[in-house]
Structures are given as structure tokens and as C-alpha cells.
Image (cartoon, coloured by chain):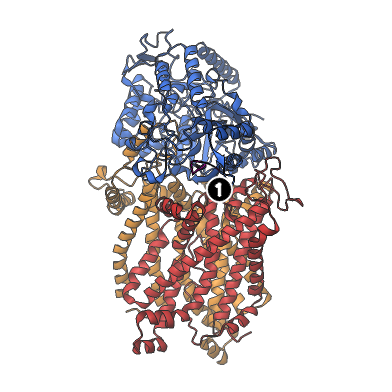
Amino acid sequence: MLRYLARRLLVAIPTLLAISFIIFAVLDLAPGDPTGNLPLTIPAEVREQVRRSLGADDPFLIKYAKWARQFFVYEPISLFENATGLALPGKENRLRILSWQTRSPVSDLIVQRLPQTLWVVGLAYLLGIVIAIPVGVYSAYRQYSVFDQIGTLVSMIGFSVPTFFTGLLAIIIFSVQLKWLPSIYDTTLVVRDWPSFVQQVKQMIMPVTVLAFFNASQLSRFMRSTMLDNLHQDYARTARSKGLKESVVVLQHVLRNSLIPVVTLIALGIPGVFTGAIITEQIFRVNGLGDLLIRGIYNSDIPLVQTITFMFAVLIVFFNILADVAYGFLDPRIRYD
Amino acid sequence: MKFVRTTTLVVGLLALMGASLAQQGRDGTVTLLYWQAVSILNPYLSGGTKDIYGSSIVLEPLARYAPDGSFIPYLATEIPTQENGGISDDLRSITWTLRDDVVWSDGTPFTSADVVFTGAYCMSDEAGCTARNFFSDIESIEATGDHAVTITFTVAKPFPYAAFVSAESPILQKAQFENCLGVRAQECAAENFGPIGTGPFMVSDFRPNDVVTYEANPLFREADKPAFQTVILKGGGDAASAARAVLETGEADWAWNLQVAPEVLARMEAAGIGQLTSSFGTSVERVLVNFTNVDASLGNDRGEYMGGDNPHPILSDLRVRQALSKAIDREILVEIGYGPTGATTCNIIPAPEIYASTANDDCLVQDIEEANRLLDEAGWERGADGVRAKDGRRFSLLFQTSTNAVRQDFQALIKEWWEELGVEVELRNIDAGVFFGNDPSSPDTYGKFWTDVQMFTSSAAGTDVESYANRWTCAEISGRANQWLGNNQHRWCNTDYDALRQELAQTVDIDARAELIKTLNDMLVQDVAVMPLVHRADVSARSNTLMGTHKQSWDSELWNIADWYRGQ
Amino acid sequence: MTELGLPNPDTGLQAPVAASKRSSAAEIWHQFSRHKGAVVGMIVFVTIVAVVLLGPYLYPVKASETNVRARNQGPSIERPFGTDNLGRDLLAQNLAGGRVSLAVGVAAMLISIVLGTVIGQLAGYYPRLDGPLMRLTDLFLALPILPLLLVIIMLFREPLRASFGPQTGIFLLIVSVIGLTSWMNTARVVRGDVLAVKEREFVTAADALGSGNNRIMLFHILPNVMSPILVSASLGMAGAIITESALSFLGLGFPSDVPTWGRLLFDGKDYLSITPMRVVWPGLFISLTVLSINFMGDGLRDALDPRLRGRT
């Protein structure tokens, strides 16, 4: 097991390097210009100077090498310095990854955006899980019952109706018509007393509900189908014939086994929480990572997009390994060698 | 320059009237909504208008534009003119006298050293200063006293009000930015996010691409201003939802740049809690005609001017261009795309008033019949499928623009009108970041203009029509040699135009200048190098309780935020 | 759209299932027809496809024709869905949009399924290829779709336009981008199933009999992993329609004079308070189509699952 883990982690390093290179190549190839949104009154020579000052005109390999050194060497050192308050020698010359739009370190931007994303998207993910598991279990246990039929319909609707459609409808109904909920997410709000807490809850209701509904729909379908697979397996029959109570059979034996693939699936979905939900964040104006990423893309902010995308890749690879390990850990039938 | 002084007087009087009841910060918080969030608060490194406006609350220039296009002194005591001796007789130097009662928000005095420093900051080539063209032709900027600065030019400048004038070129504090010169400009995140200014507000919290919080500056030179204690500048979302937040839900007091369909805005406005406020600058939505052949099979010669040896196979005929322009119904375009926030125009320079020509107004009436006649005359005959052809070539045009709901509506309408003439039209819309960018590897930039016609909006910087007119000179033709960075994307070349443009640079008398500018405009429009469509207003929305706003297009729309207050 | 990148609920990481007996089409159909949701889904789907395909004959109004005198009109007998802000007929637009959206769905789904199946099979069958191909899958999961779309448009639009004409060219581009960025889940599922099937007796037997690798993969393994592939296909088509909508929603995708359901929804969203049906119709069409496909996929899964077969 440990050797398996070590091998996977070792392979992950060159993989990630290759991935970072390819992502960079795609971004660099993509047409776009960091000066594209400047007023048209600014003449082309000036734009050229701006681009040069950003290093946007450097040859591709130099740009990549610069980014890689900043990401793999300078940023970790800076993080260490910030965490410990120490200043290592050479601090002056260690240029951090600067976003082209804001001329500030990309990692600062990410740190600033992460809380909103974790709150909204993370909470929606958690809520989705909490709703999906019991619904899925009960639907499977009472397959073809009224509950199952309704649950199937609702969850089918949940992942068939796109979030941009439900989000738009929610805003029109709850913000514009009823005026119950704010349509703008206030990131400066600090929760320190009851009214500000209510305010925070109010502004999170719509984005969290829309996303949680979507997540719960997907997960409950999956939970239901793995439960169905297990309910009719021999071990469940054996357990019943031994005279165990039905609740014990379902909740202790079947549920435990059915949860194995569900847990790995949940692990695989976690990286998505960190990149945020681009469209939902756009619609509800939640200034999270998804919003940062899409605006970076629109403004050809290559260092920013590259860094976020690469971090996403790291998370995907990492949670992939975690899911595989968890699978082996939970299911003793699987052995790694 | 008489009007300069009267405006100053009027603004001063208004300020006095408001002052009677007042004390700074009495009206609490005002919320501004910018659907493109502010990325940086140093206008010299800005990525767009939003950043310039965001910083205009804090940083001030020596003089600003007033809503009528004249100048108001801000950190200067008066506007230098030849009459008051501020501009030398040979037009090669201008001397600004600075106010001596201004302090920065950190308490240190504002002096000529700050002005000289700001010039050096932007003129450094490594800084990547976006206002670099405001400092063109400058030989030196010298402090001629603690509160006097003289700018010397390498050439005679009839219009010397670029450097240190308007929101795009405000004064930075030397003490704060001293270590941010040249290449280091990029690394000064703290300074760029929190510039110390002389304006009515100071930055108290900045989250890039999200929200800026400003607090009233207690050291502001007018003790009773601003009326608001806090300004919150929130970003994100899109134009329609920003309009909704001000006009329908009342979540914000001000929303910027609302290019939203007029009927949608009208409906939101009917909710009765806010209203639109707009102002006209020189922005004109226009269709550019390509004068070079952009056939892909030409390889490296694609879209190259080549001294006029590579003409467009269809559009180099004036009659054809006239026909295309006559087929457009500009009134319908305005009605559908802009409503009260746009006006039909046949001029590429429609403002200020004195520069607006009236010689071209016949374009306002759509005339399909005449257009058809022109095409018949030019030898383009309708084929069996209704599409015209000549010498075996089909009359087929590729029409590109940036992705934007109104532009796509315009494309659909224009395509239909041109199809009535027997012209085949293929539409293409390109992501704005790519279209307006200059990525040399992308075929889709407006600079390359590898299609037959293209549409976008452009304008002069402030009222500086002279440098605006420069972009249609032969020297500005874009091509491979200048990495398609020339400002003459049409590749239109007319030596008469160039000669007149030269004359303009030597002319000081305001009436003579106006005549020249009108002539230049008429040459462009009558040769149909460009088809002006709509004179566009800048549109914002304000809450009914927000008073004292005076939206304008020459300078930052937040230029007089010190005078804003909360009414009932 | 799987915003969170979750695998599809009905296919992702499924415990390996292998049909030991291949059942006749009739038997599958029998099972499928007992699934109420699937049958209703099929009826709805067939109806939508029929309406969209036959629409232009039943309702001969040109979708692109503007009429500035009749803008933003509500539903009427003459214009059942009303008109948009240029006076274009919305029913005609929805019909035309449906043709494009459905075509995109089918074509992108095919690309994604073929890619996913080939990569999944190779990874599952050849242990040597497993690592590299699965890392490739990780790479594609991480790639942001928008810059990729911009790159592909830049590189391939001109050649495709020259060879296929403007409309087909951009269609091929968008379909390939969607296909290229959506095969990963199929590949993961197929790989998992192949890993399980590979160890079964009949494969070992075929190997012992000297069948070539290609032959084994094509004739022995592929039929046994058909069930997750088919389910992936139904979900993939739904996903492709939604991805195209999302691209249109973000202002990319087809040129403005080619209506798609996604673009109609996107263009209509500002007019929600004036002509609400302008948003509701395309939204409803997208949702209904995807819903019906998902129900069919659900039924198909049950029908193909040998353990469920024969039960009521």
C-alpha cells in the first residue's frame, strides 16, 4: 500500500510538469491581448510598450521558464516567509507571479477569493451530499415506490435544467419581483452579529440552493444505483436469512458497501469545489475563484489563468490518487501491488 | 478660452451654495456598481476605463474637463493660455501654476516635485504607462518654483493640454511612488492598490477585481466636502443586472456603462426608484470599409496596402461604398440599439458642437432604390440567386465585429438591408478581448482587419480631435511592417487629407481649426472610408436620492464626486 | 452541465458489470419498454426531434427575417411564440435553433464516445498504456475549455471555412471542441470495465487460441462494455447540448445569425421582464430534451443490466 502510494506520488511529479507545460502552451497560443480592453483612444505604440513591460512579448519558452521558476521556487518560499514572518536572503529579487490585470501577486488574489468560493460552492457541495445520501438510499430501498418515482423525476430535473436557467429565474423571482433576497453578493460583509449573519445567509441562499440542487440530483442518482447493486447481492440475502433486522442489513451492511464508490466519487468532485462554479458565480456575482478565472481568461491574464488552472490540475491528480487509495482502504477485496 | 473662466465661476458658485449646511461625511455611504470590476487604482497602469474612473476619486490632475468640454483647474490655480502668459508665443512651452494650499491625504504638502515626478514615471519606457501618449513630444518637465511647472515641447503644440490634464493623467505622490520607477512599476502592488491622493476620498480597502472601499479624506481642501463618508465601488456581473440593481432593486446608487437594449432600460426606469443619466462625447459606432484585398490566398500580401497596389476587389469603387451606406437606415439602428442614448449621425467627428459638420446629413435617409441604381451603374448585375456579380466575382462580404448584443442586432439588420441590394453577407462576431487585442498570431484583431467590413465604436481622447484625425493618415496604415499596430485599419490613403492634417497641426485660431476639422471629417465620410452609424452617449444610472451628479464624457464620470450628496 | 466535474451519476465508477450472455435486441427492448420514465422520455424526445425537423414545412416562416414594426410582441395566433427585439419570429427561431442544438448534441456525443471508448479500451487492455493515457485524462480534465476553444478557432477556422464553407466549418469546430473536452468520464468508466472483463475466461480463451489483440478488443471486449458506453452516449448528448448552451451563454460559439437554443436563451435573458417567453421556450426545450434523454439513458441502463433483467 505504502509502496503503491509512493509510486503514484513519484509518477505524479513529471506528469504535473508536463501538464503545466501543455496548459501554458494552450494559453500562450490562444489569441488575446492583455491590452485588449484599454480604451481605443490609446494608440498602438503605447499598447506595445505596455505589453513589453508585462513580458507578454517574450518568447514562449522564456515565459514558461519564468513562470515555472516563480511557481515552483519563489511562491513556496514566499508562502513560507508569510507564514513564519521570516525574511530569507534574496527576498528583493524573488519576483512573485504577478497578474497582468492587477500587477499584484496571483497567490494573494487566490487567497482573497478562496473564502467566498469555499463558502458558497463548498457549502453547496456538502449540502448536496447530505441531501443525496438519504434520498438515494431510501429511493433504492423502496424502488419504484411513489417516493422513488418523485425522487427520480426531481433529480432528473435537477441535472437536466442548466444552472444558468434556474439561476436567472431565481433572481427574477426572489430579487426583482419579491425583493426577498439580494442579487449582489457583498464580499465585504463581516459576520459579527445577528443581523449581519442573517444578511450573509440571505445572500448565500440563492447560489447555494441552485448549486446544491444540482449536486444533490447527480449524487442521489448515483447513490441509488449503487444501493440497488448491493441490495440484491448474496451477502445481503445471507444477512437477512440469518435473521438480522432489516434496518441492520440495510444501514450496516448494504449502505457501508454502497458508500465505497460514492465516497471515491465525492473525493473526485472536490477539486471542482476549488475552481468554483463559473456560471453560478457570474450570475449571482459571487466574487469567487470561478469569477477570477473567467475574468482572467477574458482579459488574457495568462499568469493568473495558468496558475489557477495548474492548481486545479494538481488537485485533480491528488484527489485521483486519494480516491484510488480510499477505494483500496475501504474495500479489502482490492489490493495494490 | 473665455469659456474656461465662466465655467470655473459657475462651478465655484455651486460649491458655495452647497456649503452652507454642511459637514464632511454627513450622508453616509454611496454604492457604485461597475460591472467590469476595478483591477488596479493606478491609472497609468490601468487595463481599462473602469480603472481610470476608480482612481479618479482619489487622484487629481492639474485640470479636468468640464461637462461642456472646457477646462477647470483642479490642482492648478488657472488654465494657462497665451493671453495669461501660460503658453509661450512659439507654442513650445506651457507653464502651470500650482495651488499652494493642497496637501496629500497623508498630510504632506503637494508641490511641483510631485508633478515632475509623475512625468518621469510615465515617460519611462519600461513602465508600460498607458497614458504615454499624453506625454508625447515633451522635451522636458521642470519645476520652476515650488508651485510652478514648465513643460517644454519639441514641436509647436497648439493644443498643449494633455499631460497632467483629465482623469487619465493625474498626479502621483512622489514620496509614495519613488521606488516604483521604470521596471519596478509592475511590482509596486501596495502602491498601485492604494495610491495616496489629494482628492475627496482615500482608499481604505481594495480587493482587486471585486470591490473598492473609499473613506472621505479629512484633509480635503474643501472642509465641508465630500458629503459621503464612504464610497463602495462594487464590480462584477453584467450591464443588465447592474442597471437592475440601481433602477429596480435599489441595491446600488450608481451603475456605469449600461449598454442594454433601450426598451429594457425604459422598463426598469419605470419602476421609479432611479433614472438614466447620459452624456455625449465623440463616440461613434461606425462601419469601417477595407481598402485592401484580404483574400487568404494572397499569403503575406493579405491586407497589405502596398502603395495602393493591392486594392479591394469590390469596395475600392466609390459607388459601391456609397450604395452600402445608403442602404442603412440609421434611425432604426438608433431606435433598436440605443433609444434616447444615441443619435443618428453622418459624421465621424460629431462633437464638440463647433467641429460638427452638417454637409453629410443626406445619409440619414435610407435609400435602397438609389443604392440599387449605384450598384447597377457600377456594373454589378443580379444573378439567378439574387446575388450580384461582376466579371465572375460574387458580391460577397464578410462582416466582423466584437461579441456584444447590440452589435449582433446591428449585424442582423445591416445584413438584411444589404441582402436587399443583392449583396451576400457573412457575419462573424469575435470575443472582444481578442478583437480589440493586438495578438500578432490572431487573424481576428481589428488591427489586421482581414475581413471586408468591420464595426466598432471609437472616439477621441477628451476633446483632442487633432490626434484623433491623425489615425486616417497614410503613415498610420496598419500592416505587417508595424505588426498591424497602425491606427489606420481601413488602409485608406489620401494625400490631400494628410496635407490638411499637417495644416491643422500648425493652426492656432479656434475657428480656423474648426473649419479644418470639418473638412477632414467630410473627406472621410464623403469618400465612404467609414460609415458613421450612431453617435453614442455614455449611459449610467443613478438612484433618485443621489444628487449633485453631473455626468460627462470628456473626463471621469465621477469627476465631481466631492459634490455628490443624498437628497430625499 | 457538470460544473463540479462530477462523473455522470449513472456511469461514473460503476462497479464493473459484464453481460455474460449477450441478449437479443428484443429482450432489451422488452425490458426498456417496461420502464415508464424511459418510454415517456422517448416519446417526448421523438416528438421534439420530429417537430424540429418537420417544423420548417409546417411553419414556413424565415427565422432570420426581421420586422422592426413588430418588435417584442407577445404570443398571438400569427406568431405563436411572439417576436424578439428585431421582430424575428421566435417559433421559427426555436425550430431552427433546435436543429443546430440537436445536431451539435449528436455529433459531439459521437466524437466524445469514440474517443472515450478508444482511450478507455487501450488503457484498460494494455497495462503499458494505462498510466500515460490516464494522465492524459487528468490533463484534459484540467484544461480550461474557453482558451482551448479560442486556440482551436484560431488555428482551424480558416482551413475549415475554406474546405467546408463558413457554417459547416464553425459547426465542426464547436462540435470537436465539445467532443474533445468531454470524453474523459467515458474513458474512465470504459477502462474500469475493460480491466474487469479482460480477466474473464472467454478473453483468456481467445488469447490462448491466438486471436490478435485488436481482434480481442473489438470482438470480445467491446460487446461486453457496450452498456456503459450506451449510457455514456445518452448522457454525453445531453451534456453536449448544455455545453453548447453554456458557450453561447458566455458569448462564444456560433455566429450571431445561427440560432441555437443556448443562444436564444442567452440573447433573451435581458428581456425577461418584457417578453418572458423568449427565455422560457428555449430553456424549456433544452431542459425537456436533456430530461428525456436522461430518462432514456436510465431505462437503457436497466435494460442492459443483466442483474436487473427478468425482475419487475
Chain A: its colour in the image is orange
Q: Residue at x 52, y 53 (%)?
A: C167
Question: Along the horizontal axis of the image, is A148 left or right of B474?
Answer: right
Q: Nearer the viewer, residue B481 or A69?
A: B481
Q: Colour of chain C?
A: red
The quadrant the N terminus of chain A occupies is bottom left
Q: Which residue is mark 1?
A: C256
Q: What is the x, y in percent for residue C191?
A: 41, 75
The front one of A92 and B441 is B441
Q: Is residue A298 left or right of residue B259?
A: left
Quadrant where the C terminus of chain A sits is bottom left
- The chain displayed blue equals B
Q: Is residue B557 above or below residue B426?
A: above
Residue numbers of the magenta segment? B388-395
**Where is residue B419, by image quadrant?**
top right
Reply above or below: C39 against B219. Answer: below
Residue pictured at 45% horizontal, 66% vertical: C183
**Residue B62 lies within the magenta run:** no
What amino acid is found at the position of numbered circle 1 in the picture?
Ser
- Can residue A143 be seen at all in this image of the molecule? no
